[in-house]
Image (cartoon, rainbow, N blue to C red):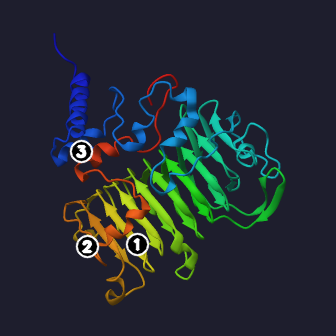
């Protein structure tokens, strides 16, 4: 009796997962290309965050346990843990001054902690930026939820936010006007430039398993002293300026900024800013950079960048092999900035221009940095990046 091609492909992928899990090296061409086919085998949670919850078939019975899985600088983000479950049943956003109960906007402006979930698959077009209150989780696991063709999500002066399993794409600028930002406050807002997610003067934020593409401005911007942020397991495509961490070289409060990027896939048709950093401390661990058209990692103003266990695959154009880019500084200045590369996998001529004290990593032990796994594992660590097709009652 013959074995179907589908079963053979499934066995190949499962063997790949097994080899990587036990530390057996596999050829480079067995990574994203072989993993790009939709995986239909048993649950494989390869990275430390996913191992915390994904393969438990009863994950939906205690959704709030997910808040215990955060790592990196955003590890203290609890979102709406301890609060009520709020179910979004209405995808409309017709009234930004007095949001309708059952809508996402109504949920995020409440002052109490809420764990926000969805009743069904939804496409939500935000008519104005979605202004969030503190202690909120937007949890789209179990449904296919898109924030699309309208405004994006805004955190301003808030804390303890978790966003997971959304698709956010085709975000555009919107006009200002009166927008309610809490149940007891409404105010006039200026025009929004079109960030998909904007983090402004906020802290303790975790963004996980979100698929993002095509926004008028940035996909994720964190500014005005925002800190305690982890962005993990996300998938980014089709964008120019992907991430901006710090918007002003003279805004010195950004020195306290601490952001972790872990297990993300920076995919097709991306130009630059993955991320672009100022002043703060940025830890990039086990991310997969498979496309960039200008540069991958940029910065200025003495930003500290620690790159560990990432994979960088350069394009064939000889002019865009360098991973890094310094802005507004001569070499006599930037050579003192701490930009370190440790166990990064450089492919197709990619190179990371380091600077500063090569032994500086030992100075940061008190920061309790997220541990990096060997770079040869990046393909599997990021295999399930982006929004997951979870089904209640099954491993995700």
Relative horizontal placement of residue 361, taking residue 200 as reference (left or right)? left
Q: Residue at x 54, y 52 (%)?
A: 76
Where residue 1 sits, quadrant-wise, is top left
Relative horizontal placement of residue 289, taking residue 240 as reference (left or right)? left
Relative horizontal placement of residue 141, taking residue 343 as reference (left or right)? right
Residue 67 point in image, percent of width and height: 54, 42
Q: Mark 3 highlights which residue?
A: 31
The answer to whether mark 1 and mark 3 are in CB contact below 8 A is no
Work out how far the residue at label 1 is from the one at label 2, CA to CA, in angstroms.
Answer: 25 Å
Q: How many circles with numbers are drawn on the protein? A: 3
In the picture, the quarter occupied by the C terminus is top left
Q: Mark 2 highlights which residue?
A: 319
Q: Mark 1 highlights which residue?
A: 304
In the image, 305 versus 168, the foreground residue is 305
Q: Which mark is residue 174?
A: none
Work out how far the residue at label 1 is from the one at label 3, CA to CA, in angstroms.
Answer: 30 Å
Residue 197 point in image, percent of width and height: 57, 57
Q: Are there few (<14), some (14-19), or many (20+) residues within 10 Å of tag 1?
A: many
């Amino acid at each position: 009796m013959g074995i179907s091609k589908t079963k053979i492909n499934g066995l190949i992928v499962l063997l790949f997962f097994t080899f990587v899990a036990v530390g057996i090296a596999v050829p480079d061409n067995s990574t994203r290309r072989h993993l790009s086919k939709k995986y239909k085998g048993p649950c494989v949670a390869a990275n430390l965050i996913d191992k915390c919850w994904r393969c438990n078939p009863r994950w939906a019975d205690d959704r709030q346990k997910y808040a215990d899985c955060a790592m990196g600088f955003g590890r203290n983000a609890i979102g709406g843990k301890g609060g009520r479950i709020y179910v979004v049943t209405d995808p409309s956003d017709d009234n930004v001054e007095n949001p309708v109960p059952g809508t996402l906007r109504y949920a995020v402006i409440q002052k109490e902690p809420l764990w926000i979930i969805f009743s069904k698959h939804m496409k939500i077009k935000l008519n104005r930026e979605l202004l969030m209150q503190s202690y909120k989780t937007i949890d789209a696991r179990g449904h296919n939820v898109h924030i699309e063709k309208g405004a994006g999500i805004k955190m301003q002066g808030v804390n303890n936010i978790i966003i997971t399993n959304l698709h956010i794409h085709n975000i555009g600028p919107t006009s200002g006007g009166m927008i309610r930002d809490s149940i007891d406050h409404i105010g006039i807002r200026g025009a929004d430039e079109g960030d998909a997610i904007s983090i402004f003067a906020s802290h303790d934020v975790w963004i996980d398993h979100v698929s993002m593409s095509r926004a008028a401005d940035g996909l994720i911007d964190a500014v005005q002293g925002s800190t305690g942020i982890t962005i993990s397991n996300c998938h980014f495509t089709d964008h120019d300026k992907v991430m901006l961490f710090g918007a002003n070289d003279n805004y010195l409060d950004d020195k306290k900024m601490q952001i972790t990027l872990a297990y993300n896939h920076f995919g097709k048709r991306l130009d630059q800013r993955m991320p672009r950093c100022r002043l703060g401390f940025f830890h990039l661990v086990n991310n997969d950079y498979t496309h960039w058209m200008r540069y991958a990692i940029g910065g200025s103003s003495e930003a500290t960048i620690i790159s560990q266990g990432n994979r960088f695959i350069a394009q064939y154009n000889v002019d865009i092999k360098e991973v890094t880019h310094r802005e507004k500084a001569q070499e006599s200045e930037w050579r003192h900035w701490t930009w370190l590369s440790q166990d990064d996998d450089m492919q197709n001529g990619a190179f990371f221009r380091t600077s500063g004290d090569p032994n500086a990593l030992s100075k940061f032990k008190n920061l309790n940095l997220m541990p990096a796994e060997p770079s040869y594992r990046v393909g599997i660590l990021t295999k399930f990046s982006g929004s997951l097709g979870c089904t209640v009652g099954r491993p995700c």
